[in-house]
Image (cartoon, rainbow, N blue to C red):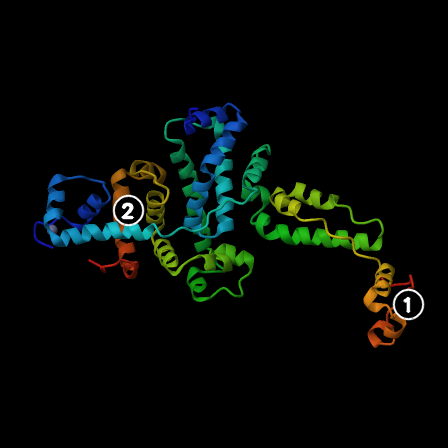
Amino acid sequence: MRKNCPDREDIFMLAKGMTSEREALAHITNCAGCRKIFESYRRLDDVLEQWNPDAQASPWFDARVRAAASQPQARGMRGFFGLELNRWLAAPVLAALLVMVGVIAFRHSPPPVPVKPVTQVAAVHPAVAPAQAAKPAPAAPQSGAQEVSMYQNLSVLEDYDMLAGFDVISELPKGSSKVAD
Amino acid sequence: MAVDSDLELMLRVSRGDADSFGVLLNRHRGPLLSYFVRMVRDRGLAEDLAQEAFLRVYQARERYQPEAKFTTWLYRIATNLALNAIRDRQSDPVLPEALVAETNGDFASPLERAQDGRPNVEEQLAESDRERMIREAIEALPEKQRAAVILHKYQDVDYRQIASILKVSESAVKSLLFRAYESLRVRLEPLLEGGLV
Ligand SMILES: [Zn+2]
């Protein structure tokens, strides 16, 4: 840089349009060293434009804001839902509830598991509602007797008596309704 | 049909018009979320913070004074939230940032990952080497420089607004940006054709 060259900060200001000092602009046009610095800031701007992280909002974004806003004296999203609860605890809580529903259904089957508990979970936690709503309700687990009967009636297992000679199958109770829970 | 200004919409929100809040939400959701993603990196945390920022706007609707641009107010709330989240992460006694930088995160729990702000597997796959270098260079900046660069470069916020958001003078913003660009120039040298000057 020559003695009368503007300092880097002035060149930066020119490159960023923060100033339009004619004298400095004229200098940059005629000074190769300063022009190179000027252009390096422009190139840096071009490079920075190549950072485009995914920032797509989740489908329940607005619903969660509205739900929190509708609470009287809402304490804030993080306070309201609890720290990280919405993201890290929703899935385990939901899974635990579904397991409980499954156990209850297994013990009292039939009738099949009602869909209601899932929608109740969604109502308690709006963040999970759209994702869960898209999934079908889990099928009710079969009772032990029904399951054995199903295996016996499969076309592949037509010769059930012959196949029952195999160790694994012989351990199955023959069509008995006395099947352990 | 004329498009309502943010200011008009916010004044209607302050009078109890929920539909106008919906319009504001729709208009600023994307830009605000992208601001948080660049500020805190973690996608889930960014979404939480963006929702929190909108909630705070809604909660403060009755006190809203149309003195500054709506986006200045929105980004001031957002910047405070983002900087607090970054400070929380840095002060986490369990996961000091230096340690986090040395480990590859294979054994980190989701909660730990949320706290340390490292990208998850999908985020890593989606990110090119170039983008990673740029992100790391910006993340290495002091917090005000980082906010100034992101507001200026990616959110298209003018210098006067940035000054108001960061509560500094306009000349201080220009100085913050100059120092930030000087650091970025050095860190991103491999990406700059022609090398350093
Ligand atoms: Zn010169």
Residue B180 visible (yes or no)? no
Asked if residue A18 can be seen in this view, the reply is yes
Classify mark 1: helix, strand or loop: loop
* Residue on which the image places disc 1: A174
Which subunit holds the residue at mark 1?
Answer: A
A141 or B39, nearer to the observer: A141
Q: Which mark is residue B176?
A: 2
Q: Is residue A4 left or right of residue B155?
A: left
Q: On what subunit does the disc labeled 2 rest?
A: B
Check residue B121 in the rendering and tell me which mark sits there, or answer none: none
| Amino acid marked by disc 2 | Leu
- Observer-side mark, 1 or 2, equals 1
Please tell me which residue is depicted at 84% across the width and 55% down the height of the picture: A107
Instruction: Say which residue appears at 87% left-offset and 62% top-offset.
Output: A149
Residue A98: horizontal and vertical position, in percent? Answer: 72, 52
Q: Residues within 10 Å of mark 1 (few under 14, many from 20)?
A: some
Closer to us: B99 or B195: B195
Q: Position of residue A7 (x, y in %)?
A: 15, 49
